[in-house]
Each structure stands twice: as C-alpha cells, then as structure tokens.
Amino acid sequence: MLQFFLLFLLIQGVLFTAELTRPVQQAVVIPFTELVAGLSAWLVQLFDAGVLSRGVTLWDLDSGFGVSIEAGCNGVEAIIVLVAAMLAFPAPWRHKLIGMGIGFLAIQGMNLLRIISLFYLGQWNKTAFEWGHLYIWQALIMLDVLIVFLVWLRFLPGREATPDPAHG
C-alpha cells in the first residue's frame, strides 16, 4: 500500500509539473480546452442554436453571457489523478490502458455535463453559479474519478486464492 501511495504521488508530481510547462500548455492543454469548449457548444446547439464557442469560451448570443473554461475546469487535472492511480496500481498494462481510456471518457462526459449546467446556471443566478462551480461540481468531478478507479479495480483480473491448509 505504501509503495502504491508513494508511486501515485510521484506520478502525479511528474504529470502536474509537465502540465504546467509552457510547451505542454501550448501544444496540449489549450487546444484540448478549446476542443472541450467546442464540443460543449455543439452539444448545447442540439437544443439551443443561440450558443457558440470561441477559443475556450462558451457564449450565449442572446444574453451575451459566457463561461470561460480555465485550468482546473477542463478535466485535465482529474484525468491526471486517475491516470496516476492506475499507473501506480499493480495491474496488467492492457487493463491500465483500457481503464485510462474508459476513465477519460467518463471524466470528460461528466465534465461536459458540468460545463453545460454551469453555463445555464450562470445565466439564471450568479450566486448559484459560483456555489455550484466552486463546491458542488469540484466534489462531483473528483467523486467521478474515485468511482471510476474503484469500478476499474473490481474488473481487474483476480489473483487465485490459495486455500489455507489449516482451514481445509
């Protein structure tokens, strides 16, 4: 358990440090965040044609209200925590890769729901938006990470239990 925890912390440290570097921000994080904003706008446009994205911002054309998807709101940090946990856990690489792929989709799916709900919540009530953004959704995204990790653990191949000779 200690080895897992220390390796988990080390991998997180490396990934978070890499994420904060200018080259990774420019080449990966900002384009990914723009993609998340575009996908959010596309999903909203299925029901509301008066929405568009520009860069990392989702805009309502009628009200002029917009939400900017910043660091911490793009799901990257949540994915880093999940990837670090899966890489640190002793499991076959095939299962790690499948878990990271499904986990990525689960986290980003929840994050899209988060962005869209906050987009509409912000147009309705600024106080509710702030509260939902800072408290409710932060906790739900990390809970999503924990649930994905725990479900992944349940699907790992089990070790054969060896019978205890003393108990038959």
Image (cartoon, grey):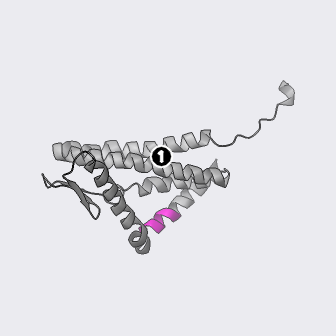
Towards the viewer: 45 or 163: 45
Instruction: Determine the residue positioned at 24% across, 49% down.
Output: 119
- Whether residue 85 is situated above or below residue 148 in the rendered picture: below
Query: Is residue 161 in view?
Result: yes
**Magenta-drawn stretch contains 159:** no
Point out the residue furthest to the bottom here: 23
| Residue lying at 37% horizontally and 56% vertically, measured from the top left | 74
In the image shown, does 72 or 28 lie closer to the viewer? 28
Specify whether residue 89 is in view: no
Point out residue 36 in the picture as x, y percentages from the top left corner: 35, 57
Tell me residue 86's x, y (percent): 58, 51
- Residue pointed to by mark 1: 145
The x, y position of residue 99, in whole percent, is 57, 49
Residue density around tag 1, few if under 14, some if 14–19, many if 20 or more, within 10 Å: many
Q: Is residue 129 above or below residue 10?
A: above
The residue at the far left in this view is 63
* Residue at 26%, 47% in the rendered image: 118
**Horizontal side, residue 38 vs residue 126: left or right:** right
The residue shown at (86%, 27%) is 166
Magenta region: 14-21
- Residue 5 is situated, as x and y percent measured from the top left of the image, at 59, 51
Disc 1 residue type (three-letter): Val
Give the camera-side residue of 28 and 161: 28
The secondary structure that dominates the magenta segment is helix
